[in-house]
Image: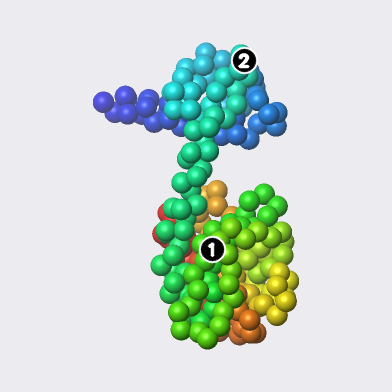
Amino acid sequence: MVGATKESSLTLERGLALLQAVAEAESEAPSISELANAIGASRAAVYRLLVPLQARGLVRREGSKVRLGLGVLRLASNVLPQLRMAANPALRELAEKVGATAHLTVADGTEAQAVAVVEPSWTAFHVAYRVGSRHPVHRGAAGKAISHPGEPWVVSAGELQPNAYGVAAPVRGVPGLRASVGVVALEKLDADVIGPHVVRAAEEVAAALK
């Protein structure tokens, strides 16, 4: 039983490695030989591993070439809602505590995208920040926190919107996720006061995603 469990685990690991190799290949459609080299397996093993991936629509074969299948898109479409659901409690607490619009932003290539936004309920006015908003990953507090995760928090002023101020902290410790939690307001924010709250919210989001 232990041997069978170990073998199943190794097969799963190799299958995931193969799927990742297809996704990260330099060519648009890597060959069976290229995939075998990438995961350190024989061509025969690659053919075997492709069978369940094809059955679930995660890859498709075109002769000796392999491409990602539409099943990957279906999986990906569920990622953002799950991120939003996990982040919302921490963002709600942060928005109400500091009286500013709170957001979770993730890196998508060279851009940063807001995937969850919570506005405070008690302020007379606040920034209307739309889910799906994008900007260069090196601009604004949210993007800079992703690009320079060594800082506990990052501040910005007027970089994305005139007279808008932001404080953001990186989300750490979630494999494969480059993200930040931040707040944005129409008045200058005291980073020394708000920064620790933002860091705490980022830690809570990371814990919810693990």
Q: Nearer the viewer, residue 157 or 147?
A: 157
Colouring convention used in this rendered image of the protein? rainbow
**Pointer 2: what residue?**
64
**For the residues marked 2 and 1, what is the alpha-carbon distance in whole angstroms?**
41 Å
Q: Quadrant of residue 89?
A: bottom left
Circle 1: is it few (<14), some (14-19), or many (20+) Cα within 10 Å? Answer: many
- The disc labelled 2 sits on which kind of residue? Ser
Q: Nearer the viewer, residue 72 or 152?
A: 72
Residue at disc 1, secondary structure? strand
On screen, residue 100 above or below 181: below
Could you tell me if residue 130 is visible in this image?
A: yes
Q: Position of residue 182 (x, y in %)?
A: 57, 70
On screen, residue 128 above or below 57: below
> Going from the N terminus, do you reach mark 2 or mark 1 first?
2
Residue at disc 2, secondary structure? loop
- The disc labelled 1 sits on which kind of residue? Leu
For residue 86, side relative to residue 180 (left or right): left
Q: Nearer the viewer, residue 85 or 203?
A: 85
Query: Which residue is found at the position 48% from the left and 78% from the top?
Result: 120
Query: Which residue is found at the position 69% from the left and 60% from the top?
Result: 135
